Amino acid sequence: MPSSSDAETASAGFVELVRSRDTPLESRFVFLAVFCIVIVGTASLLTVRRSGVQAFELPEALTNLATQLSNARDEIQLLQDIDLLAPNPDRAALIEAELTPFEQPDILEPEPGCLVFDRDPYLVRFQQLSPGTSDWGIFWLDEREATEIDHALHIAGDGESLCEDHGEWLRYEVNPK
């Protein structure tokens, strides 16, 4: 076969054949490279999957309240956009805005921007994530499991609030929008 190094044969479309060395050592390097790529890819997928914020399945007893709070969050944002609700509304302002979930008697307001609903045996926290914004989060806690957690159920006067999260509260929604 003519060499492709001279211009005439190269322009005619001849292709130079290159023999493979196909040694056992070359096969091992190819296998090792493919194996490393698969291992690194699998490890990165598992790491990415585990490192994200996770939402936990809400107990059936809380689904109605969680839906009401999700809708109320959207209404709060709309009311704040048209300046009918203050950036940091308290429970009285939310009731005045006729948002029904906040008219219930079993709601605690340990601090501004944080409302805790007591639904025995669960607690549901509706909390403003950043002061002065319309970002609200919905969190829940099973009081039966919280007895083993030091910070979950705070006694009045111990310097901590139900609005402080030490990892015991479970988030209802990861990406609400």
Image: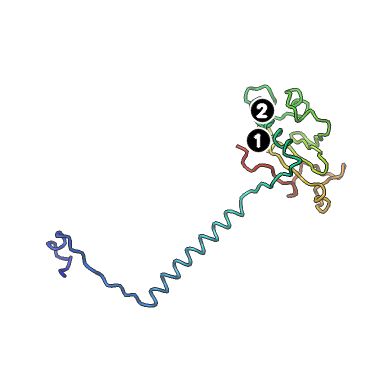
Q: Left or right: where does residue 133 sit relative to residue 122?
A: left
- Residue at 66% x, 28% y: name it: 75
Is the C terminus in the top left, top right, bottom left or bottom right quadrant? top right
Q: Left or right: where does residue 71 sit relative to residue 159?
A: left
Q: Is residue 53 above or below residue 39?
A: above
Pointers 1 and 2 in contact (CB under 8 A)? no
Mark sitting on residue 135: 1
Image quadrant in which you'd find residue 136: top right
Q: Position of residue 134 (x, y in %)?
A: 65, 32
Is the N terminus in the top left, top right, bottom left or bottom right quadrant? bottom left
Kindly report the distance in space between the C-alpha atoms of the residues bearing marks 1 and 2. 12 Å
Q: Position of residue 114 (x, y in %)?
A: 75, 36
Q: In the image, what residue type sits under mark 1?
A: Asp
- Residue at 71% x, 34% y: name it: 69
Lower position in the chain sequence, tag 1 or tag 2 = 2
Q: Which of the two discs, 1 and 2, sits closer to the camera? A: 2
Q: In the image, what residue type sits under mark 2?
A: Glu
Image quadrant in which you'd find residue 140: top right
Q: Secondary structure at mark 1?
A: loop
Outermost residue on the bottom side: it is 24
Q: Position of residue 119 (x, y in %)?
A: 81, 39
Outermost residue on the front side: it is 60
- Residue at 38% x, 74% y: name it: 26
Q: Secondary structure at mark 2?
A: helix
Q: Is residue 125 above or below residue 33?
A: above
Q: Residues within 10 Å of mark 2 (few under 14, many from 20)?
A: some
Q: Nearer the viewer, residue 76 or 61?
A: 61
Q: Is residue 110 above or below residue 21?
A: above
Disc 2 marks which residue? 75
Q: Nearer the viewer, residue 4 or 157?
A: 4
Q: Is residue 49 above or below residue 132?
A: below
Q: Position of residue 72 (x, y in %)?
A: 69, 30
